[in-house]
Image: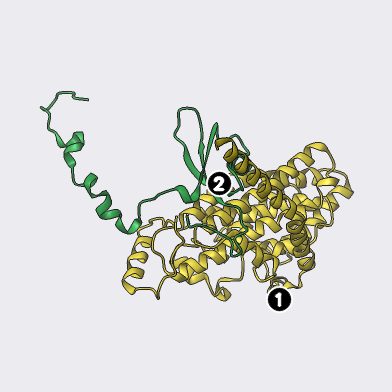
Chain colours: A green, B yellow
Amino acid sequence: MPDAEAPDGSQWPLWEVFTQPGKGKPHEHAGSVHAPDAEMALQNARDVYTRRGEAVSLWVVPADQIVASSPSDSGPFFDPGNDKPYRHPQFYKAPRGVKVF
Amino acid sequence: MSPTPKSPPDDPALVQAFEARIKAGETIEPKDWMPERYRKQLIRMMSQHAHSEIVGMLPEGNWITRAPNLRRKMALLAKVQDEAGHGLYIYCGTETLGVSRDTLVDQLHAGVAKYSSIFNYPTLSWADMGAIGWLVDGAAIVNQTVLAKASYGPYARAMVRICKEENFHKRQGYEIMATLAAGTPAQKEMAQESLNRWWWPSLMMFGPSDVNSPNSAELLKWRVKRKSNDDLRQRFVNLTIPQGQAIGLTFPDPDLKHNPDTGDWESGPIDWDEFMAVIHGNGPCNRERLEARRAAHDNGAWVRAAGDAYAEKQRSRSQSTAA
């Protein structure tokens, strides 16, 4: 999500939109909108992303406030989680015939 | 997030790794490395698509005030509003490639960007609202269902959302046509006359034949497109002919015939000279469409200025209360 400023700097700032599709569900990224402030960003997001009751809650976040991991580093960055099979239940043996789960 | 840096000439090793990812069916995301040419092709294709959604509001907007009843009027308003939303989904997807929406809109208004040639035809009767929903949105759905599996994540996700919404567009259009076709002789004639005008331009929506489509091979290789123009056009024809026959309308193609071996409806030759003329600015409404777009943008300038002024006022107020 690059910072999409217009050449003359006149374009309204970019906001990323997250929608919660139902109560108890997590918010998911839906897309983005341009708006001069948070209140109008929410209203624009409602009009653009929830015309058919797709959400019970909306978040809007200034796009330049999102910090993301870098795809080129994703190997080493996520490594600590990938090389530890002992964090999964399948790593452990149980006597045959016993229902552990 | 920082702007995408201008990349040097593509490193062959990176291109190879990129094409391996495409081949493995992986989705490419905005911050992933991509060949400059892939980025350019996507910007071209996605911005043309976004422009088509926005310009596509104009032929139908023409009939909102003259819809025959309140139900039709509400449906048409909702459809035209959806098209604005679809334009915004795709513009925001295009912005993830490092180009601003203002830049793209400027290109449209300057007449240097393309949009779907079909929107350069006039809407002369109420039946055209039926024909557009049924044929133009029907063709768009065939196209977009395949694009929903395109390799670029933001584009594919926008297509999923759009396809869900356009099914309503197609059905409301077909309902208008079916109602007219079952009406008085004059109403049926109105539906038939509209189908006669929109049929060929709808087939042209899929773009030049594969033998004359300069971009197709590369787009297919990078999974920006999934099927060729001719394959998609054939799929649309096969879906649509039985729908027209079911409501007693005929298609303006004397060569149209069913091939029992392939199961395909084979249509006659398309007038590509007409297609090229419309693409190059000489369709019936090219100038009118661009003028309407520019006027809408200029007449909305005060809204953008007011939005800025209001946001500025709120900011200075909250600063003065904080102080």
Front-most of residues B248 and B43: B43
Disc 2 with disc 1 on a shared chain: yes
**Identity of the residue drawn at 78% across and 41% down:** B72
- SS label for mark 2: helix
**Identity of the residue drawn at 50% across and 30% down:** A22
Residue B208 lies in what quarter of the image?
Answer: bottom right
Type of amino acid at the residue the image marks with label 1: Asp
* Residue annotated with mark 1: B273
What chain is tagged by disc 2?
B
Could you tell me residue B63's position as x and y percent? 82, 50
> For residue A56, which numbered disc appears in the image?
none
Q: Are marks 2 and 1 in contact (CB under 8 Å)?
A: no
What chain is tagged by disc 1?
B
- SS label for mark 1: helix
* Residue annotated with mark 2: B161
**Identity of the residue drawn at 36% across and 65% down:** B18
Could you tell me residue A64's position as x and y percent? 48, 51
Identify whether B27 is placed above or below A57.
Answer: below
Type of amino acid at the residue the image marks with label 2: Arg
